[in-house]
């Protein structure tokens, strides 16, 4: 993983609301944007913004079903981030 991508993922996870959205998706398996908006004290447009940042970082994948968008965690991207972070910081790979 290139350093710029490593930084992009770190920035995506640095926002507390975005981190909690990602955490919720990872725990639940797959959720729609509207389901996420119901769980967080922000409007759906803000949830959509956070999801876009997470998608650009490669942390979540989206699938469409009609007019709905469903999001799921990209666990392999998270593993790659962890490995790259450990390599960059000189720690042991988990």
Image (cartoon, grey):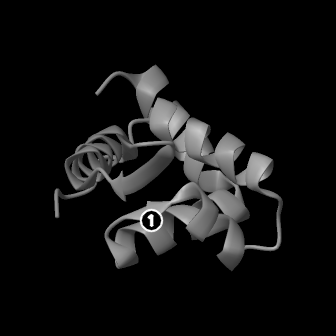
State the image coordinates of residue 45 (x, y, percent, origin top left).
77, 46
What's the residue at 23%, 47% (across, down)?
Answer: 83
Which is nearer the eye, 80 or 25?
25
What's the residue at 82%, 64% (across, down)?
Answer: 42
Which is nearer the eye, 32 or 86?
32
Quadrant in which the N terminus appears: top left
Q: Is residue 65 left or right of residue 34?
A: left
Q: Is residue 60 above or below residue 37?
A: above
Q: Is residue 82 left or right of residue 39?
A: left
Q: Which residue is mark 1?
A: 31
Q: Is residue 4 above or below residue 11?
A: above
Which is nearer the eye, 94 or 67?
67
Asked which quadrant contains residue 20, the reply is bottom right
**In the displayed image of the protein, which residue is found farthest to the front?**
66
State the image coordinates of residue 28 (x, y, percent, origin top left).
37, 77
Quadrant in which the C terminus appears: bottom left
**Total residue callouts:** 1
State the image coordinates of residue 32 (x, y, percent, origin top left).
50, 59
* Element assignment for label 1: strand
Asked which quadrant contains residue 12, the reply is top right
What's the residue at 34%, 21% (across, down)?
Answer: 2
What's the residue at 16%, 56% (across, down)?
Answer: 93
Mark 1 is surrounded, within 10 Å at the Cα level, by few (under 14), some (14 to 19) or many (20 or more) other residues, namely some
State the image coordinates of residue 62 (x, y, percent, origin top left).
38, 42
């Amino acid at each position: 993983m290139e350093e710029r991508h490593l930084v992009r993922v770190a920035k995506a996870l640095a926002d507390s609301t975005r981190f909690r959205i990602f955490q919720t998706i990872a725990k639940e398996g797959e959720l729609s944007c509207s389901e996420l908006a119901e769980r967080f004290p922000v409007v759906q447009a803000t949830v959509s913004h956070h999801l876009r940042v997470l998608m650009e970082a490669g942390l979540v994948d989206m699938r469409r079903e009609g007019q709905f968008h469903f999001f799921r965690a990209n666990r392999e991207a998270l593993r790659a981030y962890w490995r790259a972070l450990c390599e960059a910081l000189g720690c042991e790979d988990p």
